[in-house]
Image (spheres, grey):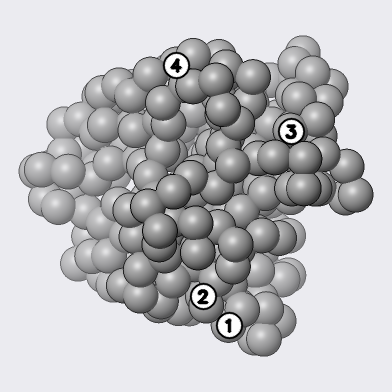
Amino acid sequence: MELQRYTGNFSKCLAEVVRAKQKIATAKQGMEYRIEQGVDSDVCQGGFWCPENFNVVDGRILAALGDYNPLIPYAEQAVNAHRGGKEFYLNDAVLLNGKSATEVLKEIAEQDSEKPVYKKRVLDLGQTQTHPVSTDSFADDNGIVFLARGKISANRYGLFLKNKARTPKITFCLPFVSQENYSRGFWLCGLDLGDRSDFFGGYHGVFGGDYGSLFGVSCKRSAEGAS
């Protein structure tokens, strides 16, 4: 698998991926590529956005796959909001497939409620807060299992961080639950050996900055990764 890094704000990177007829590499693909390339590779040295994201909806956190991430169809608006130090609020004007984004997220979460975590399209994390996770117990964290699309993949990446990057634990950052509905991107941090290789599910600090990045992957490879 080959991934191509694009740099800039999220909207700019996304436009370049579309022009290249690619898709954004998923969190799972990014983790697998890091394991394949090793800790000294470019994919490990810098962080990157993934198509998955985290949304605060009606006082709970809903993690979503790329198909249900409101930040993707509204990338430019989201970047402008974050550049101004504001949230990208999920108001009535933010739609997914012609319907209110918040309603779609809630509907999919309900439809998938009985599915195993790795098969969910939208995962209801309730009011889960930012927390540490030992790298030898990634398979026990629902948020990481959701992103890795399975316990085996989650465990493999955790042990890679532990044994190759000498990282005993990471911090899984999540958005603050509030009375307002809003959307945050997911940023997988670069590997700082023995220090920080965190999961930023509640992060927008570089979303509108020109020093962010994401990886593009061919649509065929993207489909294989999703499967």
Q: Residue at x 71, y 60 (%)?
A: 73
Q: Earlier in the sequence, mark 3 or mark 4?
A: 3
Residue 37 horizontal/vertical position (percent): 34, 66
Q: Nearer the viewer, mark 3 or mark 2?
A: 3
Q: Residue at x 69, y 31 (%)?
A: 122
- Which element type, helix, strand or loop, lies under badge 1? helix
Residue position for label 4: 128
Tag 1 residue: 16
Residue for badge 2? 13
**Mark toward the start of the polypeptide (4 vs 2):** 2
The residue drawn where x is 74% and y is 33% is 102
The answer to which of marks 3 and 2 sits earlier in the sequence is 2
Give the CA distance from mark 3 to mark 4.
Answer: 19 Å
Q: Are marks 1 and 3 in contact (CB under 8 Å)?
A: no
Residue 198: give x, y in percent of width and height. Answer: 28, 41
Q: Are marks 2 and 1 in contact (CB under 8 Å)?
A: yes
* 165 with respect to 124 (left or right): left
Q: CA distance from mark 4 to mark 1?
A: 34 Å
Q: Residues within 10 Å of mark 2 (few under 14, many from 20)?
A: many
In this view, the residue in front, 124 or 35, is 124
Residue drawn at x 55%, y 57% as measured from the top left: 78
Which residue reaches farthest bottom? Answer: 19
Q: Secondary structure at mark 3?
A: helix
Q: Amino acid at mark 3?
A: Thr
Q: CA distance from mark 3 to mark 2?
A: 25 Å
> Do tag 3 and tag 2 residues touch (Cβ < 8 Å)?
no
